[in-house]
Image (cartoon, rainbow, N blue to C red):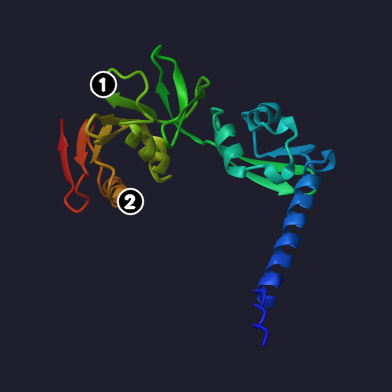
Amino acid sequence: MAAPRPQRPTRSLAFRRFLAVTIVFTFLYVGVLALSRLSYFRVQVIDVVGNSHETAGQVIAMSGLDDHPPLLTVNGGRVSDAIAELRWVSHVTVSRHWPHRVTLMVHERTPVAVAPDSLGVLHLVDGDGHQLDPATVGVDLPHLAAVGSADTWAYDRWARPAAKVARRLPTTFAAHVRTVSVDVKGRVTLHFTTPVTFYLGRIDRLHAKFVAISSVLAERTLAPNSYIDVSVPTAVTVEVR
């Protein structure tokens, strides 16, 4: 009697379906990739909106999109990071529109104070301490002062608390703040035009400290050169120096 012939292993129906689907998707991917590299699917139109200090030309040049890359390969995060190298740009929202348009929504920095550079020239400063353009004559913003250091520009580093406080000054008394100073330990003091001084200390519990300042201003007439300590908002002290 003849020995039974060994049966060839057969692939399962599920595996054959998986293989067919994989092949189809591979061809589709290769096809889409090839189409995306055609000139029609490369970046041809770039809309720049939201910019006022940086020109559209500067924004586009920094973005790298003027090289007309395939729209499929445009990385919004990288484009935003590149454009944010411009002085006034905080970040950029990048939107792709098929087949070949990109919109760049520019979010610019907002000046909240002025501060001198190493030559004594006043520059606009945003709430993160970034140095912006030179200030125009008569600009009505508080001055920043970094006390106890010879750093030429420390407002984006250890002196940043001064810029953060300037950004958050409430409208109830912001117009009366002449200078926001900070020492090397991060302790902030507000110097008013009256002249009176409010010592905030570190910039924790800022809202409570601002409420304490507003209450002091509303409830009493302060003598010139008054020094008010609101570093502990629930235990405000007032003295004349």
**Residue ID at (65%, 77%):** 6
Q: Are marks 2 and 1 in contact (CB under 8 Å)?
A: no
Name the residue at 78% across, 41% down: 37
Secondary structure at badge 1 equals loop
Q: In the rendering, at what x and y percent does residue 30 appear?
A: 75, 50
Q: In this image, 2 relative to 101: left or right? A: left
Please indicate, yes or no, whether residue 218 appears anywhere in the rendered image: no
Task: From the viewer's side, name the closer residue of 184 and 12.
Answer: 12
The quadrant of the picture occupied by the C terminus is top left
In the orientation shown, which residue stands out farthest toward the bottom? 1
**The residue positioned farthest toward the right in the image shown:** 40
Query: Looking at the figure, which quarter contains the N terminus?
Result: bottom right
Task: Identify the mark at residue 233; answer none if there is no mark.
Answer: none
Determine whether the residue tagged by mark 2 lies in a helix, strand or loop.
helix
Q: Can residue 2 be seen at all in this image of the molecule? A: yes
Q: Position of residue 212 (x, y in %)?
A: 27, 50
Q: In which quarter of the view is residue 152 placed? A: top left
Between residue 146 and residue 45, name the one nearer to us: 45
Amino acid under label 1? Ser
Residue placed under numbered mark 2 in the picture = 207
- In this rendering, position of residue 87 left or right of residue 72: left
Give how far across and how far down residue 216 sits, in percent: 26, 47
* Image quarter of residue 195: top left
Q: Considering only order in the chain, which callout, 1 or 2, is on the residue closer to the N terminus?
A: 1
Q: How many marks?
A: 2
Spatial CA distance of label 2 from label 1 is 28 Å
Going by the numbered disc 2, the residue's amino acid type is His
- The residue at the point 31 percent across, 19 percent down is 151
Q: Nearer the viewer, mark 2 or mark 1?
A: 1
Q: Using the image, tell me which numbered label, if any, was put on residue 149.
A: 1
